[in-house]
Image (cartoon, rainbow, N blue to C red):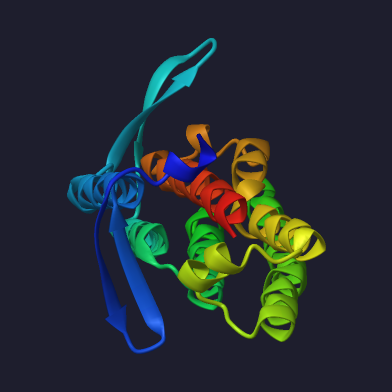
Amino acid sequence: MIDTISGYIYGIVPFGDIIFKFSEFSTIGFIIALIFTLLVYLTKPEKQLEAKKFSGDVLIDIDINELRNRRFMAIVCGLATAGAMLTYDLFDFALFLTLVGIANIGIVSAVKREHVLNAAFQYGLTSIIATLPLFGAAALILAKTGTLSILELEKMKSNIFFEKILYGLGMAGETGVAPYYAAKAEMFRAPGSPYILMIHLSSLLIIVKTVEILLKI
């Protein structure tokens, strides 16, 4: 049943207009995001082996300052993803998505290689463009229903099919295409690449969370 996608609800914590809902689904996503954020914080890939086809493995020393920037952006991405798992307001969810997108750009652009920077630039353009359908859809939903609270929207069952499509497109632009640009940049072979895993984790969790939201409202 679609109605049971959230699972058992443990409680709802309102902070003014910001509403956090603790259900089985959101709590598990929140914990997973925090665990991976902690792993990112503890990971220190200062030295990394790069396999060469003919010359064997080569040890690469990575500048610690570059790693600090990438680690910081990965932690920001993890915390924003954790917040997105719990929030139950469309506007706040869009803000978390935007923060995740900014952090993803920071993770990719911290790698000082031309093809990686080109991919970061293209991803940045996509994220900027995606803010229009994302926040535009939230504005249209607010104008049609008078609220952005997911708790209220799931009670109304309003006809906002077009707005849902726009919202989904905005989400895809902010986070869903991040793995594509990361793979294009060959980030997994770049020095310090373990931090790129946070991009894929955040994209996966937020895509699933967005599906839950769009099915419920």
Could you tell me which residue is drawn at 69 percent across and 69 percent down? Answer: 134
Is residue 2 rendered to the left or right of residue 67?
A: right
| Front one among 196 and 126 | 126
| Front one among 204 and 73 | 204
Image quadrant assignment for residue 77: bottom left
Could you tell me which residue is drawn at 39 percent across and 18 percent down? Answer: 57
> Can you give x and y, in whole percent of width and height, for residue 181 in the image?
66, 45
Position above or below: 121 against 25:
below
Is residue 66 rendered to the left or right of residue 186?
A: left
Position above or below: 161 against 156:
above
> Can you give x and y, in whole percent of width and height, for residue 58 in the image?
39, 25
How many marks are shown on the rendered structure? 0
Is residue 54 rendered to the left or right of residue 163?
A: left
Question: Can you name the residue that lies furthest to the right here?
Answer: 162
Q: Tell me if residue 124 can be seen.
A: yes
> Can you give x and y, in whole percent of width and height, for residue 184 in the image?
68, 38
Position above or below: 98 against 53:
below
Position above or below: 67 against 5:
below
Q: Tell me if residue 98 can be seen.
A: no
